[in-house]
């Protein structure tokens, strides 16, 4: 039994609930016989992967749904073993090179070449090419992206690449220019309402309007999250009546707590307190950038208008440093101290010119 | 002849006459030449010319030798050869002192010819006639009898006369009269001898035995009372060792082993051993930990068995060497009981987590319970682990070393601290006095200060100074201890230096001028660099700085700067490691130095080792593992469910969305239910829960807590993801034991069903092909059936058994365990009816020829192939 997220996931382009125009376009592309490399991008939970699978089905028929999962082992130059999970059907292959960390280039080179150099053997296949889906393309290292460039051109006859990314900003321009960019925007609230209604209908219960809107408000355009929340809600309080509170993910609640701590008091002791909270979050494998972003957003909500821009600016500043650096906690704390300083100086109305 | 002999000192022309004059007389001249060192070479020259001796060398010893040698050659007379022999023994003093020794005898020789020139000549020619006059008779080593005259008396008599006579006769051949020369010589000789005595005295200390022992060894305390330093430590150690006496030496009545029999007589320990069976001595180097251990062991009557870093120290060693030694109680060939000293234990190899590490084995050794009911006469089982009955002393520098983590709880810890400088200085001064080293106490206290109380280092330095200079001054100490200052420093000490200014004392110790201590950059960066662990220091700085400036109104300024530097440090180091650009390494220390001007403050508490970062790292690793196992579960679910869960595996989604919500999804608000009495809506909920858990292979695993309470734990423990600050999320109630128990049973049953399905599926596939089974397709057919069998009946375990039984029955005609055909026993129940239906579906349509090489023979209709 699958979760609702998967159970009610549309399988074909026709059954997709929103972005009909995009679906039409994909359909016509699949029919055209001249299928390009593609780059799907958009926020998390907008339905990129769903659309990709639907497109594949449109291209190859039901055969793509016969999946098998392999684990491939690569040897890094330093003889370290890298395990990569591969999902594949007869017609396509899905890889997440970022699993290999900084050796993603190796994975790209090995797998892509291997696939690209063999032709489609299934004579009944609708298309002559195979498709490679690269997930989390925006976390590909520069080397890996560079390795992709030439391969994309050279083996065009045998292979199409579909990249899936949250944003295009971290993809190098040559890649972008080789792909057809497909933006999958987050669904609008009404669209989400529709989807939730559809899910509840299929699951066999009635979703009260207010619950639905609460979920939609809370999920911020992330449909996957919305459906997970819905399912969790249904499990925890099956009748869905009365005062329903939408459970936030725990890390988010915790981040908010941290933000409140920062705003409520600025002192060395508080710095220490916040630090232990950060450690706790980090130890739960919450990505530090997400921590910073969530906390910052919450802090911004609670401070004066004039400080908001400043705080966000520094959040961005330290996020960059965090990406460059190694010890995330240093930069998180640096930001906290910065915010405390800003807040304090604002509070006491002291000239802040000296702190830039 | 004699005159000419004297003339040797003067013009060389006289020599030719002497040589011509005869071999016997030439001897005596030669011996005359021995008088003064300056003349010796001259006297040699003629002799060489004469070719009498070949072996002589130009130095004094050689001359004397020639003198001895010449005699037998030129003069056969035994008495004269005897005199030459008597000189040789006199020359017992080292060869350099020949002149001094020869002096009287030679002068007597000088006198001899002058008084009775004829007598000597006759003496040499007619030997036997003089024999009666000789009063001393001696035997040489080769058995010759030698007669010696009493020369001394004669010498005394003849010396003045002889010299005066010669001076008178020779006139002014010498510028200074011979007696004055002689006096001068004797004065010089006396002075030289005095000096030589002094040298000899020193040499006897530092030359013969001394040269090959270090002062450290020479002045190592031998007895307990000799021990210097912290007396409390020594006493405590002694007390601990003494606690073993009952066990090792037996009590006074000699009931040594009788207590072995009456077990449990002593509640604490039947051997009356101390509670902690290990002693851990820790402290900085050079304070005498090893010495203390040895001295105390000897004093307490033990034979020391030492294992130090030079020995192999793997877990195997414990079994091979230590255990036998401790069990047998004494070393081979020794009557004393053995005491084990494990020196430098913090460097023991294989100190990792594995169970074969040295420390681990050692700790295990102490845990071994003494065997019960062991009678003295009883034959011991050689494989049985006997308790250790001998004390073990472990010595280390860093008691917080990670490798000792396991040892610490079971060991009695005694920490060495630096003794008061005044004691160390006093001991050093004593040693200096013995060694004849002039040392002022200021220099010595400087030395102790620089060495930070390291007595061994001090002694080595002093010995080094001794080998070059005579006395110890402060400047020499400074020069000699240049290297000591840069000694490797631990992370903690570097941190302390970063966060607190140098004490006035230390400034003085290092001999820095007043302005120097304000120049900190070079000093601190060197120190950071010297430790070689920049990142550890950075973490230390990070964890410590926020505890400072607590009462500062504007802490943020300093904090920001500190963070700025830390951020820079981090960027540098990550650039260094990621790009392999290790040239950046030299700049790293400088990025940490700014903590000094920012936060240095006098009187702040010492920096302590902060474990927060390390603990966080460990926790992160554990959680990563849990995520990994969760994603493995997801992957298997993906395989099973046609790729359904695969989009949830990707990294951020898993942590941020899936992990929190799956926890909520699998914890519905079920009340403790009796499986028979369950409302339909709860039944549906339960079904779904079980479905999801089974598909993700999440299970509840029964566990017994320490207090014996049974509990169910999620496996993999994904509920850690909703647990922050060790508090579970508020909206997710921990389901009660009964519920979990119930769910666990359901899940297990479901998983068992699924496993059997996998087996069945293959078989069913054949059914579909060949047997025309009524089931349309495996995928669609199996679920409803399982659903019915699984959920419609309330009694889960029995259901499971029946399900499993069904599989067997499906393949074979129903037989019981012994292979006898049976009729279905539960034909009366409705369940059995249901099963019958199922059985019909599985009615065999092919014959399974077991044991045949053509394993499966099937009846196949032609239509199947069309």
Image (cartoon, rainbow, N blue to C red):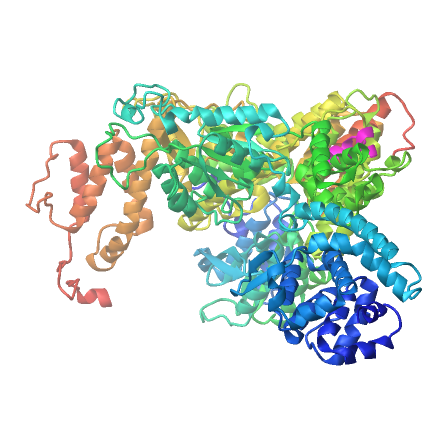
Q: Residue at x 81, y 48 (%)?
A: B191
Residue B674 falls within the magenta-colored stretch: no
- Magenta part of the chain: B495-508
In the image, taking residue B437 as reference, residue B699 lies left or right, namely left
Q: Image check: B452 left or right of A163? A: right
Residue in the image at 76% along x and 29% along y: A300
Asked whether B860 or B671 is in front, the reply is: B671
Looking at the image, is A151 positioned above or below residue A85? Answer: below
- Residue B671, picture quadrant: top left
Horizontal side of residue B477 vs B710, given as left or right: right
Q: Which residue appears at 51% of the width and 36% of the height?
A: B394
Point out the residue furthest to the left here.
B820
User: Position of B367 compared to B140: left or right?
Assistant: left
Most foreground residue, B172 or B484 = B172
The one of B706 and B487 positioned closer to us in this rendering = B487
Q: Looking at the image, which is closer to me, B335 or B240?
A: B335
The x, y position of residue A303, in whole percent, is 78, 25
Residue B734 in the image: x percent, y percent? 45, 24
| Secondary structure mainly formed by the magenta segment | helix
């Amino acid at each position: 039994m699958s979760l609702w997220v998967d159970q009610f996931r549309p399988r074909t382009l026709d059954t997709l609930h929103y972005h009909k125009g995009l679906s039409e376009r994909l359909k016509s592309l699949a029919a055209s016989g001249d299928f390009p490399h593609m780059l799907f991008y958009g926020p998390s939970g907008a339905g990129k992967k769903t659309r990709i699978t639907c497109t594949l089905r449109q291209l190859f028929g039901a055969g793509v749904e016969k999946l098998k999962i392999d684990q491939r082992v690569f040897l890094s130059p330093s003889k370290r073993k890298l395990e990569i999970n591969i999902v594949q059907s007869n017609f396509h292959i899905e890889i997440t090179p970022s699993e290999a960390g900084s050796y993603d280039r190796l994975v790209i080179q090995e797998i892509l070449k291997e696939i690209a150099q063999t032709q489609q053997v299934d004579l009944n296949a609708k298309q002559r090419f195979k498709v490679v889906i690269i997930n989390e393309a925006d976390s590909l290292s520069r080397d890996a992206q560079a390795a992709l460039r030439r391969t994309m051109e050279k083996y065009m006859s045998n292979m199409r690449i579909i990249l899936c990314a949250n944003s295009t900003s971290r993809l190098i321009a040559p890649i972008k220019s080789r792909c057809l960019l497909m933006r999958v925007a987050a669904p609008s609230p009404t669209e989400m309402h529709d989807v939730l209604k559809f899910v509840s209908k299929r699951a066999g219960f009635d979703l009260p309007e207010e619950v639905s809107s609460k979920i939609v408000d809370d999920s911020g355009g992330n449909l996957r999250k919305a459906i997970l929340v819905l399912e969790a809600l249904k499990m925890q309080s099956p009748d869905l009546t009365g005062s329903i509170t939408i459970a936030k993910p725990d890390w988010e609640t915790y981040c908010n707590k941290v933000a409140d701590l920062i705003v409520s008091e600025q002192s060395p002791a508080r710095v220490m307190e916040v630090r232990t909270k950060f450690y706790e979050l980090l130890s739960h494998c919450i990505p530090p950038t997400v921590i910073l972003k969530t906390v910052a957003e919450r802090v911004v909500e609670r401070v004066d208008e004039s400080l908001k821009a400043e705080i966000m600016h520094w959040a961005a500043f330290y996020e960059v440093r965090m990406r460059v650096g190694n010890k995330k906690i240093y930069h998180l704390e640096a930001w906290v101290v910065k915010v405390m300083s800003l807040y304090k100086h604002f509070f006491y109305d002291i000239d802040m010119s000296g702190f830039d | 002849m004699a005159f000419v002999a004297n003339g040797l000192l003067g013009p060389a022309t006289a020599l030719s006459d002497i040589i011509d004059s005869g071999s016997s007389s030439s001897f005596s001249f030669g011996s005359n030449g021995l008088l003064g060192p300056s003349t010796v070479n001259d006297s040699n020259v003629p002799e060489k010319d004469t070719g009498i001796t070949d072996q002589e060398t130009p130095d004094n010893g050689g001359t004397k030798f020639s003198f001895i040698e010449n005699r037998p050659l030129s003069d056969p007379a035994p008495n004269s050869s005897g005199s030459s022999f008597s000189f040789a023994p006199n020359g017992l003093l080292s060869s350099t002192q020949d002149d001094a020794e020869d002096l009287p005898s030679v002068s007597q020789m000088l006198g001899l010819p002058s008084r009775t020139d004829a007598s000597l000549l006759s003496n040499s020619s007619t030997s036997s006639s003089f024999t009666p006059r000789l009063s001393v008779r001696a035997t040489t080593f080769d058995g010759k009898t030698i007669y010696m005259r009493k020369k001394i008396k004669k010498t005394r008599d003849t010396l003045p006369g002889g010299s005066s006579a010669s001076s008178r006769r020779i006139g002014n051949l010498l510028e200074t009269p011979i007696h004055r020369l002689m006096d001068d010589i004797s004065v010089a000789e006396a002075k030289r001898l005095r000096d030589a005595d002094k040298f000899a005295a020193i040499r006897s200390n530092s030359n013969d035995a001394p040269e090959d022992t270090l002062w450290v060894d020479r002045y190592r305390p031998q007895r307990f009372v000799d021990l210097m330093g912290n007396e409390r430590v020594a006493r405590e150690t002694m007390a601990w060792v003494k606690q073993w006496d009952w066990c090792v030496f037996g009590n006074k009545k000699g009931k040594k082993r009788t207590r072995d029999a009456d077990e449990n007589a002593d509640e604490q320990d039947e051997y009356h051993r101390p509670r902690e069976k290990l002693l851990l001595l820790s402290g900085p180097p050079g304070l005498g930990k090893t010495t203390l251990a040895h001295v105390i062991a000897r004093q307490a009557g033990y034979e020391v068995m030492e294992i130090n870093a030079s020995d192999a120290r793997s877990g195997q060693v414990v079994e091979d060497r230590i255990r036998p030694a401790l069990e047998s109680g004494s070393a081979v060939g020794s009557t004393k009981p053995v005491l084990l000293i494990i020196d430098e234990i913090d460097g023991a190899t294989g100190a990792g987590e594995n169970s074969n590490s040295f420390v681990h084995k050692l700790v295990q050794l102490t845990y071994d319970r003494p065997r019960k009911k062991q009678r003295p006469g009883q034959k011991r089982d050689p494989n049985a682990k006997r308790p250790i009955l001998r004390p073990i002393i472990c010595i280390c520098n860093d008691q917080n070393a990670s490798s000792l983590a396991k040892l610490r709880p079971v060991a009695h810890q005694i920490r060495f601290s630096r003794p008061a400088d005044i004691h160390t200085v006093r001991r050093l001064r004593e040693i200096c006095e013995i060694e004849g080293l002039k040392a002022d106490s200021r220099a010595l206290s400087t030395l102790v200060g620089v060495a930070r109380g390291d007595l061994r280092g001090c002694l080595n330095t002093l010995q080094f100074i001794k080998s070059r200079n005579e006395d110890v001054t402060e400047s020499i100490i400074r020069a000699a201890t240049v290297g000591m200052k840069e000694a490797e420093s631990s992370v903690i000490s570097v941190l302390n230096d970063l966060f607190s200014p140098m004490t006035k004392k230390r400034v003085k110790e290092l001999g820095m001028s007043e302005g120097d201590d304000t120049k900190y950059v070079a000093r601190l960066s060197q120190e950071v660099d010297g430790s070689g662990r920049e990142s550890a220091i950075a973490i230390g700085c990070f964890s410590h700085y926020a505890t400072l400036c607590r009462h500062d109104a504007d802490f943020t300024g300093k904090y920001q700067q500190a963070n700025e530097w830390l951020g820079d440090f981090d960027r540098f180091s990550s650039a260094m490691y990621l790009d392999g650009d290790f040239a950046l390494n030299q700049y790293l220390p400088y990025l940490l130095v700014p903590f000094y001007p920012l936060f240095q403050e006098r009187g702040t508490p010492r920096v302590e080792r902060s474990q927060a970062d390390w603990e966080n790292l460990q926790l992160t690793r554990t959680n990563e593992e849990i995520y990994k196992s969760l994603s493995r579960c997801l992957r298997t679910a993906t395989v099973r469910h046609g790729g359904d869960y695969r989009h949830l595996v990707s990294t951020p989604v898993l942590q941020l969305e899936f992990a929190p919500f799956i926890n909520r999804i699998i914890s519905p608000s079920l009340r403790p239910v009796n499986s028979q009495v369950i409302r339909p809506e709860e039944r549906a909920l339960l079904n779904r829960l079980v479905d999801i858990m089974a598909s993700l292979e999440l299970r509840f695993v029964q566990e017994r807590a320490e207090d014996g309470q049974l509990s169910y734990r999620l496996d993999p423990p994904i509920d850690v993801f909703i647990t922050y600050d060790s508090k579970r999320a508020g909206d997710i109630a921990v389901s009660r034991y009964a519920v979990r128990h119930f769910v666990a049973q359901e899940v297990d049953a479901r998983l068992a069903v699924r496993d059997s399905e996998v087996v069945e599926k293959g078989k069913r596939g054949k059914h579909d092909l060949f047997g025309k089974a009524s089931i349309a397709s495996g995928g669609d057919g199996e679920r409803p059936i399982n659903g019915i069998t699984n959920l419609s009946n309330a009694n889960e375990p029995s259901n499971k058994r029946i399900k499993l039984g069904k599989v067997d029955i499906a393949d074979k005609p129903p037989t019981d365990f012994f292979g006898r055909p049976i009729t279905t026993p539960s034909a009366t129940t409705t369940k059995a009816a249901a099963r019958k239906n199922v059985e019909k579906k599985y009615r065999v349509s092919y014959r399974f020829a077991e044991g045949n090489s053509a394993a499966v023979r099937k009846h196949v209709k032609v239509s199947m192939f069309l």
